[in-house]
Image (cartoon, rainbow, N blue to C red):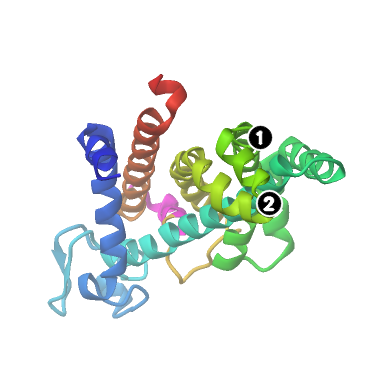
Amino acid sequence: MRGDAGRLLRDRRAALGAAVLGLAVLAAVLAPMLAGDPIAQGDVVATRFLPPLATDPLGAFHLLGTDRFGRDVWARLIYGARVSLGVGVLAVLLSVVVGVAVGAVAGYWRGWTRVALLGFTDFALALPRVVLLLLLASLWQPSALLVIVVLGLTGWMAIARLVYAEVRALAGRPFVESAVGLGVAGPRILVRHILPNALTPVIIAAALGLANAILLEAGLSFLGLGVQPPTPSWGNLIASGRDTLVNAPWVAAAPGVALVVVVVAATLLGDALRDRLDPRRNG
């Protein structure tokens, strides 16, 4: 295991992606130590639209400047990382849990159970995800919890298909047949013998899905269907600065650059994991 991790980290894409994601997560966790209150407002007239590296009349330093309400862009960026990364990770975890459960059951048990689960999965795959996201997000009060649930429940189908294929392939292996011959119960065989060997494509899909989930959360928040102000997320931070791109471009540029960097890092890490862990590529 350590050897696999070492080989993976020697891949420049994996090392760069892991380093950037690690720094982003660390900054989000240490947000109270790295920045002040993201919704604090002082004298709006005196502190609004201060440029990066400026000091306001009260002596407070603003690394990335301030927005239209005099709020510190750095503080809102760091606290927005908590929301955007947290929503992305939790949505992917929900997708993984649902996808693994559906794919494992459909792959191991035959009959109407398999037909029903695969039919439901194919039906869900046929639905346009973006349209479904917009529809569901518009039916309920927008919030971070709603975005997590919506993203999670619309992103499990590909994982279910991957797990289904892996479980079907592993079910005929000698170690599984031996367990069946010894009288081991079906659920125990599935959980203890098959699933641990079927999780490699799930890890790859989760790493690649994280970038997509973060982008979708940002898109929903940008449209006003995700995390609502004054709670900062990178999507609504970009939306709040779209009208000031000429006179105060830093308001939208800071979260926009952060979003691009984190998404590219997650994609690089996912690509490296796929190349290193997928036996069909290595073979």
The image shows residue 145 at horizontal and vertical percentages of: 58, 67
Element carrying mark 2: loop
Q: Is residue 86 left or right of residue 261?
A: right
Taking the spot 21% from the left edge, 70% from the top edge, the residue there is 34
Taking the spot 33% from the left edge, 79% from the top edge, the residue there is 40
The image shows residue 158 at horizontal and vertical percentages of: 62, 38
Q: Main secondary structure of the magenta part?
A: helix
Q: Which residue is denoted by mark 2 in the rendering? A: 183
Residue 23 to residue 277: above or below: below
Which three-letter amino acid code belongs to the residue tagged 1?
A: Arg
Asked if the residues shown at circle 1 and circle 2 are in contact, with their CB atoms under 8 angstroms apart, the answer is no
Q: Which residue is denoted by mark 1 in the rendering? A: 168
Residue 224 to residue 265: above or below: below
Quarter of the image where the C terminus is located: top left
The image shows residue 237 at horizontal and vertical percentages of: 42, 58
Q: CA distance from mark 1 to mark 2?
A: 20 Å
Q: Nearer the viewer, mark 1 or mark 2?
A: 2
Taking the spot 71% from the left edge, 38% from the top edge, the residue there is 125
